Amino acid sequence: MLGEYLPVLLFMVVAVGFGALLLILGWLLGPKRPDAEKLSPYECGFEPFEDARMKFDVRYYLIAILFIIFDLEIAFLFPWAVVYREIGLVAILAMTEFLAVLVVGFIYAWKKGALEWE
């Protein structure tokens, strides 16, 4: 039984080892010329002009949450699409119901103006 997991374990060891090797090589071979600009905190390419603790607009978070919700829809669709021929009519109806609920939620968010960025 444990022999079946040996390829997975070997793959994980090689992947972690290769990643660590690349990080170490980058650190050893990379240029090390720090200056004031490189050591300063990065603020999206421009100088900070307000307090770092300023409040974000709620719409920013709303757009982010809506993106996550509709992105997870795709994560549920991929495994279902791979096996939809074997799972039968009940699973197709369940997925149709799932998509219908998401479409209703999308239409509701659209009508409420949650997708508007002004």
Image (cartoon, helix red, strand yellow):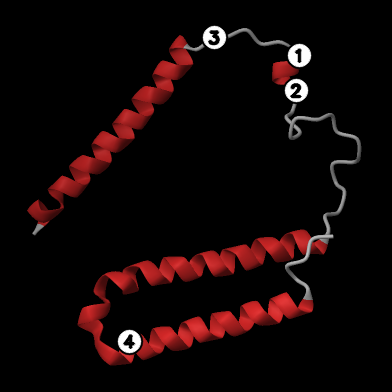
Q: Residue at x 58, y 64 (%)?
A: 68
Mark 3 highlights which residue?
31
- How far apart marks 1 and 4 lie (CA) works out to 59 Å
Mark 1 highlights which residue?
36
Instruction: Tell which circle, 2 or 3, labels the residue nearer the N-terminal end.
Output: 3
User: In which quadrant is the C terminus drawn?
Assistant: bottom right
Element at badge 1? helix
Give percent across and percent down for residue 34.
66, 11
Mark 2 highlights which residue?
40
Q: Alpha-carbon neighbours of circle 4 within 10 Å: few (<14), some, or many (≥20)?
A: some
Q: Disc 1 vs disc 2: Cβ atoms closer than 8 Å? A: yes
The amino acid type of the residue labelled 1 equals Ala
**Left-right relation of 116 to 34:** right
The mark lying in front, picked from 2 and 4, is: 4
Image: 87 above or below 74: below
Instruction: Tell which circle, 1 or 4, labels the residue nearer the N-terminal end.
Output: 1
The amino acid type of the residue labelled 4 equals Ala
Q: Residue at x 91, y 39 (%)?
A: 50
- How far apart marks 3 and 4 lie (CA) works out to 56 Å
The quadrant in which residue 32 appears is top right
**Left-right relation of 14 to 100:** left
Instruction: Tell which circle, 3 or 1, labels the residue nearer the N-terminal end.
Output: 3
The amino acid type of the residue labelled 2 equals Ser
Element at badge 4? helix
Element at badge 2? loop
Q: Disc 2 vs disc 3: Cβ atoms closer than 8 Å? A: no
Mark 4 highlights which residue?
91
Give percent across and percent down for residue 13.
25, 38
**Left-right relation of 43 to 12:** right
